[in-house]
């Protein structure tokens, strides 16, 4: 069970990392578009940049939200792994 738990934990960490990278990418796009909007003189283009910026910002928030469950599962699995390891050590002694 320990190897399965460890492997699952590593897979969940990878999933969480993927969501975090996607969130960072979307946040950078949002900031870039907001900056463009600030310097844009044409009102229609400014509104378009701001709308697109908000869209990317919402994607960033969703990605961060999606990264939380794998972290929680990873922590729980690591706790189970630690408990199993402690039991094995006690049994050997």
Image (cartoon, rainbow, N blue to C red):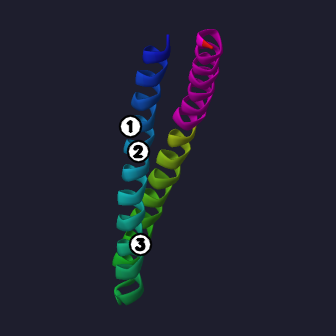
Mark 3 to mark 2: distance in Å? Answer: 21 Å
Q: Does the magenta stretch include residue 11?
A: no
Q: Is residue 51 above or below residue 63?
A: below
Say whether marks 2 and 1 touch (CB < 8 Å).
yes
> What kind of element bears circle 2?
helix
- The answer to which image quadrant residue 35 occupies is bottom left
Magenta segment range? 69-92
Residue that label 2 marks: 17
**Left or right relative to 34: residue 89:** right
Q: In this view, does 22 lie above or below 70?
A: below
> Residue placed at 57% from the left, 40% from the top?
68
Q: Is the magenta stretch mostly helix, strand or loop?
A: helix
Residue that label 1 marks: 14
Task: Report the front residue among 70 and 74.
Answer: 74
Residue that label 3 marks: 31
Image quarter of the C terminus: top right
Task: Report the front residue among 52 and 16.
Answer: 16
Nearest to N terminus: mark 3 or mark 1? 1
Q: In this view, does 25 lie above or below 87?
A: below
> What kind of element bears circle 1?
helix
> Residue placed at 63% from the left, 9% from the top?
91
């Amino acid at each position: 069970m320990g190897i399965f738990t460890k492997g699952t934990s590593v897979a969940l960490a990878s999933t969480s990392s993927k969501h975090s990278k996607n969130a960072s990418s979307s946040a950078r796009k949002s900031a870039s578009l907001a900056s463009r909007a600030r310097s844009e003189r044409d009102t229609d283009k400014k509104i378009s940049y701001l709308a697109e910026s908000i869209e990317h910002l919402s994607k960033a928030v969703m990605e961060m939200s999606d990264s939380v469950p794998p972290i929680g599962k990873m922590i729980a699995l690591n706790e189970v792994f630690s408990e199993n390891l402690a039991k094995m050590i006690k049994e050997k002694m």
